[in-house]
Image (cartoon, rainbow, N blue to C red):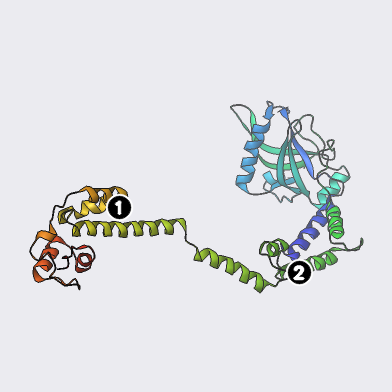
């Protein structure tokens, strides 16, 4: 929050506290249980009723006005005596309202010129439960029986609300200012703290985690972090490792199938089946190739043997045609094809 905003809030709340003086911040609106209204049936106030009331309050999104003698309901000028800014429910106590009083209303109440209040509300017919609050009026002739006067404070009910002067004192102490420091000094101290916070700093825990020594600057810390990220980038992820394994397995399977073809252990139309077999169970496919008979006797076909003394593995024209029909390339034939014994 900006210092100007804090100062504005302090000033406004301090003025509010001075205007209210000894008036309660929270005042009881409805006692818990069945509430009696002169000339009307009682209505019920409980936690369920408060939920309905508070839901209506939040949905409207407006503070509830406190006027004089219900002038808001008449077609006349109706200055506010105060505003209900929040509501709460306390079991055993009932529904209470947080009130921001005007200076004029606070003086009326302090002088006991106004002692009571009269809310305008809605009650549900089915169970006589309170469901909404529309406005509240300062009055000396309320219709609600056994009403608690505005100035009456329930024991312990308002202890949580400290005047704004107390908050200012706490700020002064927290900022280690002189006891007589005012809002200007508080603002100046907050401004200095914000300026210090805006300067780049490196937390001690980060320096220790990076194993840095002394008092490293921001650049060194950033460089260390990038170095760590570089190590992470250079590593191989689980997904990348799995993909690499699959690629190697495919290559080994292809080589095993090519060797089986060149050895005549499988026919060209078995190539797809053999590739799946070799990929799924390399050891099993190797055992199959070792045990399988030669179904394509390449060494018995014309041109299958090499000319005497030939050591350069060159293929004659007939063998090239045979290998082409069987799907065997030159590299595979030279690596796995039979050789003619030396004469």
Question: Where is mark 1, residue-wise?
Answer: 279
Callout 2 crowding tier (Cα within 10 Å): few <14, some 14–19, many ≥20: few
Question: For the point 75% across and 65% down, which residue is it?
Answer: 3
Location of the N terminus by quadrant is: bottom right
Question: For the point 13% across and 59% down, which residue is it?
Answer: 298
Question: For the point 87% across and 42% down, which residue is it?
Answer: 112
Question: For the point 60% across and 45% down, which residue is it?
Answer: 59
Which quadrant of the figure has residue 55? top right
Above or below residue 73? Residue 30 is: above
Regarding mark 2 in the picture, which secondary structure is present there? helix
Tell which of 68 and 56 is nearer to you.
56
x, y (%) of residue 179?
A: 92, 60
Which quadrant of the figure has residue 330? bottom left
x, y (%) of residue 60?
A: 61, 47
In this rendering, position of residue 228 left or right of residue 194: left
Tell which of 328 and 150 is nearer to you.
328
Q: Is residue 29 visible?
A: yes
Question: Where is mark 2, residue-wise?
Answer: 196
Above or below residue 189? Residue 26 is: above
């Amino acid at each position: 929050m900006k210092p100007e905003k804090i100062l504005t809030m302090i000033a406004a709340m301090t003025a509010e506290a001075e205007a209210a003086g000894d008036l309660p911040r929270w005042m009881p609106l409805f006692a818990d249980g069945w509430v009696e209204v002169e000339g009307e049936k009682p209505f019920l106030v409980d936690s369920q009723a408060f939920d309905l009331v508070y839901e209506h309050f939040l949905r409207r999104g407006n503070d509830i006005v406190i006027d004089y003698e219900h002038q808001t309901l008449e077609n006349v000028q109706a200055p506010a005596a105060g505003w209900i800014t929040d509501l709460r429910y306390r079991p055993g106590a009932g529904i209470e309202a947080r009130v921001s009083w005007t200076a004029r209303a606070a003086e009326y109440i302090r002088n006991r010129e106004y002692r009571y209040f009269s809310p305008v509300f809605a009650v549900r017919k089915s169970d006589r439960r309170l469901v909404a609050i529309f406005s509240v009026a300062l009055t000396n002739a309320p219709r609600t029986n056994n009403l608690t006067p505005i100035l009456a404070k329930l024991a312990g009910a308002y202890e949580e609300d400290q005047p704004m002067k107390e908050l200012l004192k706490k700020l002064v102490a927290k900022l280690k200012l002189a006891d007589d420091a005012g809002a200007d000094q508080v603002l100046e101290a907050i401004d200095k703290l914000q300026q210090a916070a805006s300067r780049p700093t490196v937390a001690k825990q980060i320096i220790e985690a990076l194993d840095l020594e002394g008092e490293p600057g921001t650049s060194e810390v950033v460089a260390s972090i990038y170095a760590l990220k570089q190590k992470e980038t250079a590593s191989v992820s689980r997904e990348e490792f799995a993909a690499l394994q699959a690629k190697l397995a495919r290559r080994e399977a292809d080589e095993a199938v090519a060797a089986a073809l060149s050895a005549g252990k499988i026919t060209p139309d078995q190539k797809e089946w053999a590739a799946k077999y070799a990929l799924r169970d390399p050891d099993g496919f190797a055992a199959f190739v070792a045990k399988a008979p030669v179904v394509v006797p390449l060494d018995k076909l014309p041109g299958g043997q090499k000319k005497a003394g030939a050591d350069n593995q060159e293929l004659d024209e007939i063998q090239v045609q045979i290998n082409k029909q069987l799907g065997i390339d030159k590299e595979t034939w030279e690596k796995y094809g039979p050789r003619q014994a030396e004469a």
